[in-house]
Image: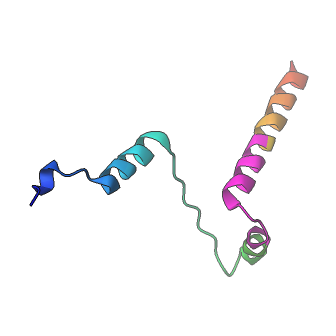
Amino acid sequence: MADKKSRFDQNAYIRNYQKENHYRLSVVFSKKYDSDLIDHLKTKQSKSEYVKKLIRSDMNRDDDSEEQSE
């Protein structure tokens, strides 16, 4: 039987790859105070893409406002 140390550990490989190549963020919503946000997010097919789109839009808006102030 093969020694466990010499076997390829696919789970460790995947964890390491994700650690080196991804940034994970967790956001907590209050069911009491943020129910409107929760309901809106539930309508989105991809929460990740939705959040990225919002951030990019905000970044572009910030860039535009900096250009106008110069």
| In the image, residue 33 above or below residue 21 | below
**Residue that appears at 27% across and 53% down:** 9
The reply, left or right, for residue 48 in relation to residue 14 is right
Residue farthest along the front direction in this orientation: 1
Residue 19, percent from left and from top: 41, 46
- Nearer to the camera, 42 or 26: 42
Measuring 86% from the left and 30% from the top, which residue is drawn there? 64
Residue 54 placement (x, y as % from top left): 77, 49
From the image, give the main secondary structure of the stretch colored magenta: helix
Q: What stretch is highlighted in magenta?
A: 40-56
Quadrant of the frame with the N terminus: bottom left
Toward the right, the furthest residue is: 68
Q: In the image, 3: left or right of 16?
A: left
Q: How was the colour assigned to the protein in this rendering? A: rainbow
Number of marks: 0
Q: Where is residue 68 in the image (x, y as percent from the top left)?
A: 90, 24
- Judge by depth and name the residue closer to the eye, 55 or 4: 4
Confirm whether the magenta stretch covers residue 48: yes
| Residue 10 % position (x, y) | 32, 53
In the picture, measured across the screen, residue 31 lies left or right of residue 62, that is left
Between residues 45 and 59, which one lies in front from this camera angle? Answer: 45
Figure quadrant of the C terminus: top right
Residue drawn where x is 36% and y is 46% of the image: 16
Residue 34 is one of the magenta-drawn residues: no
Front-lying residue, 59 or 19: 19
In this rendering, the answer to whether 20 lies above or below 31 is: above
